[in-house]
Image: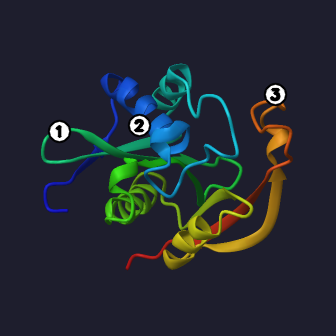
Amino acid sequence: MSALTIRLATPSDRDAIVSLMQRAYRGDESRLGWTSEADLIDGERITPDAIDQVLQNPLHRLLIAKNGDGQLIGCADIEHLSETPDTCNFGKFAVEPSLQGGGVGKVLMEAAEAEARRSFAANRMIMTVIQGRDALIAFYARRGFAATGNSVSMADIHTDPKMTRGHDLILLEFAKDLDEG
């Protein structure tokens, strides 16, 4: 972990971020890790245009993690929620599948929380996880996230039923209070 570098993403990182997110969540390569959605969801996880929009939006801070060789191995986005000024949404979180479980995600989450406090004076972070992803939910629980009781159907977000293979996947909301410690 000592060779890990975390910084804000730039437009030149866009294609590597898209590729990483695809590898971490879709297709056979994603099955090397434990965050794969390959058996649940089809299609692209993220598009280059979506990353461009995030990078251009002053309410977002997209962080990337690189190893000692300069390879992108992780990313995470925080979005300041203007309707709840003390809160940021945590998303676009991915770690290279072969490195999942090695601590990169934990360090990247800590950096995202610090960035939320520093850039937006946030004291709360929210996120969503697909219902039934017990190992992933446990990972976030170990990092202080707790279920809020709120949820949304993925069909409300993605209108193409082929993407979710016709299943009504439910996204559960989790929240964490950010402290200075």
**Residue 87 appears in the picture as rendered:** yes
Q: Quadrant of the C terminus?
A: bottom left
First in sequence, mark 2 or 1: give its number. 2
Q: Does 49 appear above or below 26?
A: above
Marks 3/1 in contact by CB < 8 Å: the verdict is no
- Colouring scheme applied when the structure was drawn: rainbow
User: Mark 3: few, some, or many residues within 10 Å (few <14, many ≥20)?
Assistant: few
Viewer-nearest of labels 3 and 1? 3
Residue 4, image x, y percentages:
20, 54
The answer to which quarter of the image holds residue 115 is bottom left
**Residue closest to the eye, 70 or 113:** 70
Q: Secondary structure at mark 2?
A: helix
**Residue closest to the eye, 47 or 98:** 98
**Residue 177 appears in the picture as rendered:** no
User: Mark 1: few, some, or many residues within 10 Å (few <14, many ≥20)?
Assistant: few
Distance from label 3 to label 2 (Cα)? 23 Å
Q: What is the residue that sits farthest to the front in this orientation?
A: 28
| Residue under the image location 71 percent in, 72 percent down | 147
First in sequence, mark 3 or 2: give its number. 2
Distance from label 3 to label 1 (Cα)? 37 Å
| Residue under the image location 45 percent in, 48 percent down | 94
Q: Amino acid at mark 2?
A: Leu
Residue 66, image x, y percentages:
24, 45
Marks 3/2 in contact by CB < 8 Å: the verdict is no
Q: Secondary structure at mark 1?
A: loop
Q: Does 27 appear above or below 144?
A: above
| Residue under the image location 72 percent in, 62 percent down | 173
Q: Which residue is mark 1?
A: 70
Q: Amino acid at mark 3?
A: Asp
Q: Which residue is mark 2?
A: 20
Q: Which residue is mark 3?
A: 160
Residue 96, image x, y percentages:
37, 47
